[in-house]
Amino acid sequence: MKKLRVIVANDHTLISAAIRSFIENCHGMEVLGSVRIGPAARGLISRKKPQLIFLFLAMRGYEGLEHAEKMLKSFPKVPSIALTVNNSAEYVSKALRIGVDAVLPQMAQPVEFTRAVRAVMRGNRYVSPRLPKASPDATGFERLTPRQRSVLRLMAEGHSTKQVAKALKLSPKTVEFHRARLMERVGIYDVPGLVRLAARVGLVSIDK
């Protein structure tokens, strides 16, 4: 029986060998190569044509996910599994939004990885039961339209209504309408709360 061909992409090159060993200990899998998430990963995937992409996201912030999103958009038909050190509900939600098919915690055992592989190869999604479900405000964010997300991002970056209107080529009244609707959908009615939401879902970063 042919082995499942896997590419390992990660945001921390020092642990590539350990992740490769982890996957190779799972029967029926062959690691075609290990590479850092980014242009090099996209090139390797194009050449090797894996059946599965395995992501290791060692960074707790959203930078790794942002790079992964660009990569996954280039290969929408290739299933992907992410092993992450960030176990927050917001992080898991964002990982699923960018196209990851399965999310596992850092301490996942080979048996759970195998379970996730079986799910994604059948076209299903898998989230470890040890990870939290999406929080209410993250779920509300899922329901925002692209325009509302743009308004939220610009507001969170500190832009005024007039500045948002100019950036999006809308009237101030239209911006106010979108702001009111997005507040209703996420259940947050103050700007500081919206800024925290935007940071949690990865729209903006907040410097400490």
Image: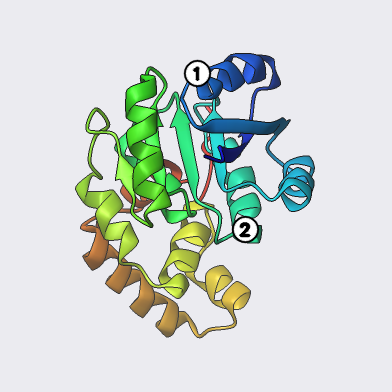
Residue type (three-letter) at the residue carrying disc 1: Asn
Residue pointed to by mark 1? 25
12 in relation to 202, above or below:
above
Question: Residue 110 appears at what percent x and percent y?
Answer: 39, 22
CA gap between label 1 and label 2 equals 26 Å
In the rendered image, the vertical position of residue 198 relative to residue 132, given as above or below: below
Crowding near the residue tagged with mark 2, few <14, some 14–19, many ≥20 C-alpha atoms within 10 Å: some
Residue at 46% of width from left, 26% of height from top? 27
What residue is rendered at 38% in x and 32% in y? 114
Of the image marks 1 and 2, the number of the one nearer the N terminus: 1
Nearer the observer: mark 1 or 2; the answer is: 1
Q: In x, y percent, where is residue 146?
A: 46, 71
Q: Is residue 177 above or below residue 82?
A: below
Residue 132: image x %, image y %? Answer: 24, 34
Q: What amino acid is at disc 2?
A: Phe
Say how many tags the image has: 2
User: Which of these two is toward me, 47 or 134?
Assistant: 47
- Expressed as whole percent of the image width and height from the top left, the position of residue 153 reads 49, 58
Q: Residue furthest front?
A: 1
CB of mark 1 within 8 Å of CB of mark 2? no
Q: Which residue is mark 2?
A: 75
Q: Nearer the viewer, residue 52 or 85?
A: 52
Quick check: 190 left or right of 200?
left
- Which mark is drawn over residue 129? none
Left or right? Give the position of 11 relative to 144.
Answer: right
Task: Look at the image and tell me whether residue 107 can be seen.
Answer: yes
- Measuring 30% from the left and 40% from the top, which residue is drawn there? 127
Residue at disc 2, secondary structure: loop
Q: Is residue 207 at all visible to an observer of this figure? A: no
Which of the 4 image quadrants contains residue 129?
A: top left
Q: Secondary structure at mark 1?
A: loop
